[in-house]
Image (spheres, helix red, strand yellow):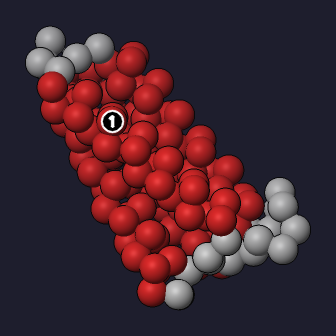
Amino acid sequence: MRPALARSWLLGEAFTLAVASAVHGGWLVAGHAHPQARTAEAVIATVLVLAAFETWRRPAHARTAALVGQGFALLGTLVGLGTIVAGIGPRTVPDVVYHVLLLAGLAAGLVWTVRCRPD
């Protein structure tokens, strides 16, 4: 696996979660503040950034770092989608669309990571 490619994918995912966290913090879009979603998205983004950092610090462990980071993010996103379905989380169309697209991106990243042979 190429650590630079894994790092780029992880950082891209982290960026989208950081933007979502800022939206739910009420900093980018008025009327979409949701403190619990903001916190969850910030935690997931941080885990993805740490996984990306690990691909740089220890390139031999890039695959493992990508699997762990994306696995955590996928689980957290599923929890977020569950809160939307249960009526606890934000239920706007953009939130639902974002979660579905994020799940697709995380799943694609996980499949790609699993299929890549370690260098």
Q: Nearer the viewer, residue 11 or 30?
A: 30
Image side of residue 20 versus residue 11, left or right: right
Numbered marks: total: 1
Image side of residue 115 versus residue 110, left or right: left
Q: Is residue 23 above or below residue 115?
A: below
Residue 115: x, y in percent?
15, 25
Q: Which residue is mark 1?
A: 108
Judged from the image, the secondary structure of the residue bearing numbered disc 1 is helix
Q: Residues within 10 Å of mark 1 (few under 14, many from 20)?
A: few
Q: Quadrant of the C terminus?
A: top left
Residue 7: x, y in percent?
41, 26
Q: Name which residue lies at 33% across and 35% down.
A: 109
Q: Name which residue lies at 12% across and 18% down.
A: 117
Q: Is residue 64 above or below residue 112?
A: below
Q: Is residue 58 above or below residue 23?
A: above
Residue 56: x, y in percent?
37, 23
Q: Can I make out residue 69 in this image? A: yes
Q: Name which residue lies at 67% across and 71% down.
A: 92
Q: Nearer the viewer, residue 13 or 3?
A: 13
